[in-house]
Image: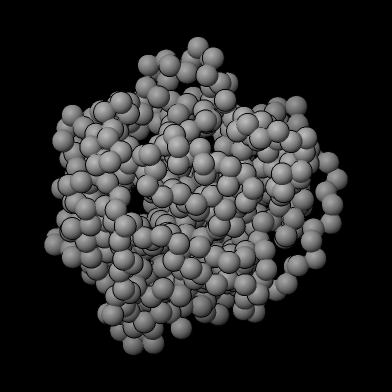
Amino acid sequence: MTISRRNLLRGGSTLVALTTLGCETSSPLDAGLEDTSTPPRDTPAPEPDVREQPDAGPPLTGPFQHGVASGDPFPDSVVLWTRISEASAAVSVDYEVAEDPAFASIVATGSVSTDASRDYTVKVIAEGLASATSYYYRFVAAGETSTIGRTRTAPEGDVSRLRFAVASCSSLAHGYFHGYRRIAERADLDAVIHLGDYIYEYGTGQYGRIRSYQPDHEIRSLEDYRIRYAQYRGDADLREAHRQHPFITTWDDHESADNAWRDGANEHTDEKDGPWAPRLAAASQAYREWMPFREGEGGRLQRALVYGNLIELIVLDTRIWGRDLQASGSGDPTLLDEDRQLLGADQEAFLLGRLEGSTARWKLVCQQVMMATLPAFLNTDQWDGYPAQRRRVLSAIEDGGISDVVILTGDIHSSWAAEIAADPSTYVPATGAGAVAVELVAPGITSPGFSEGLAALYTDIVNDEAPHFRFFELVHRGYVILDVDADRCQSTWMHLDDVTDFRAGVETEAQTLDCTSGTPRWNPGEMAAARSDAPTLAP
C-alpha cells in the first residue's frame, strides 16, 4: 500500500492503515486507538487544551528576549547568534568571547549592526579561536548585556572521543520541550545535531492542541514565519539548549510546508496559499535569519564539518534543494525513473565526493528522511520514493570500499536502527553481511509517533518482514545521544515520559546500540558514561 508518512502517523489514516494490516474495525476508536485526525485547513480551530502553563524559567526582558545561540563549529571559528527584541531602528551590537564564564580572559570581540531587513537578528562568525575548546560569549546592545552562552569549537588532528545529541521534530502544539531541557543539562556534548522540523507551520488546533500558535493561522508570509520562530525561541527549554551547546542544523518540510519539494508542497495550493516561490523564499529567509548556521551560496544548506580524524559530518538537504515531486504511488511511471532526484545531481556529487575523499574514521550523513525500507507501506516521501538515487549512493559506498557510514535521520517521529544494503537481496539478517551502512532515526522532541494500538499491530509486521531493523520503538518522544570513538559509534535512544504535561520530563534510556568500526551492524551496547572533564555550563 502507498501511504505518506504524515498520514500514517495521523489518526486520520488509522482506519486505512488498520485495514491494510488486516484489522477489521469500523472506527479507529473501536481498536482503542487515539483519534488525532487533523481538521481541514483554515477552518475555525477549537480552543486549545488549557495547559498553557509558563515554560520553565521566567521570560527574558530587555533587548535579548530570544536568547543567544551558536552553531557550525570549525576548529578556529563558530557562528554566534542573537536577536534584538522590540527594536524600531538600526541597532549596533557588540559581542565578546571568553575562555571563562566570568569573562576574565576575553579572546575575541566585534561589533555588527542589525535592522528590520533581517528581523533584527544578529549572526556573526567569531574567528581566531583555538580548536577543541569551550568558550563563553555574550552580546551588548542599548546599554544592556545578554545572557551568557557557551559554545565549543571542533577539534583538529587526532581525536579520541566525541559526543552529540541528535534531535528532530518539535511540534509546539503537541507538548512541552522537555527533551531540549534534558539536552541542555548535558555538559559534555560537543554539539547538537538537529535534523529538521524545528518549527511547524500549522495554525492553532490544526495539528496538536496542547499549546496554541503565534500567529494563530497557518504561516505563509515572511512576517508569519518570523513570528513563529520568535515564539519558538520564547520557549525557555529550547533557548537553554541553544545557550549551552552549538547546533548543527538542516531543515525538513515543516520549516516551509508539509511534504514540501522543490516546486511545491503536499498541503500548499495556489488557490489558498498563493504562489509557492514567494512562500518558499519567505521560509528560507526566516530560517537563515533565525538559525545559527553558515549560509551557503545560493541558499545551500549542504555543507561538511570535520572533527579531526574521527568524524566528518555531511549535512544534506533532502527536502527542497533538488527534490522532484513525490510519486503518487507504486503505479506511478516516474517512480523508477533513473533520473528521479531526491538530492539533485549536484548534491549527489557533493555527497559522494565528501564520502570518497574523507579522511575521518566515521562519516555521519545528516539528512531528513528514512533511507531504510519500511515494510507494508511505500512511503514516497522517503528514499523509497527515489529508488534509483538510493541505489546509486549505496552502490558507490559499496564499490568504493567506503566504511563506517552512519545515516542520521529524523522526520518520522519514532526510533529506529537499521542496517542498509545496496542490494537487499544480498543482506543476511543473521550476520548483517551485505550491509554497507547503518541508519539511526531519532524520535521527535514532541511530534507524535504511532498510537499505542497501531504501534502494536505494526510491530508484528516489522518483526516478521523487516529483519534489517535491529531496534524500533514507535510511540515515545525524545532524542538520541551519539557517542563516538575510533572503535565504535554508539547510539542511545532517550525517551521521555509525557510531553503533554509541563510538570513531566523524566527520561529513560530506551536502547543502546554499538556499530563497530569496519562492520556496518548494530549490536547491543552499554551506554557510555558522561565525560568527567566536561567544561562548566554557562551560568
Q: Is residue 222 left or right of residue 114?
A: right
Residue at horizontal 19 percent and vertical 42 percent from the top: 403
Residue beneath the point at 43% across and 25% down: 386
In the rendered view, tell whether residue 185 sits above or below residue 123: below
Residue 450: x and y in percent read 60, 47
Side (left or right) of 436 relative to 37: left
Front one among 493 and 357: 493
Q: Is residue 73 above or below residue 54?
A: above
Q: Is residue 69 above or below residue 385?
A: below
The answer to which quarter of the image holds residue 529 is bottom left
Colour treatment of the image:
one colour
Task: Please state the horizontal and vertical placement of residue 297, each as a whole percent of the image.
Answer: 38, 40
Q: Report the front residue among 109 and 492.
A: 492
Q: Position of residue 460 (x, y in %)?
A: 51, 41
Quarter occupied by residue 213: bottom right
Location of residue 48 in the rendering, given as x and y in whole percent from the top left corner: 79, 58
Counting labels gives 0
Query: What residue sits 36% from the left and 25% below the top?
Result: 389
Left of 537 or right of it: where is 456? right
Residue ID at (55%, 72%): 506
Q: Quadrant of the N terminus?
A: top right
Q: In front: 222, or 475?
A: 475
Can residue 442 be spotted in the picture? yes
Q: Is residue 285 visible?
A: no
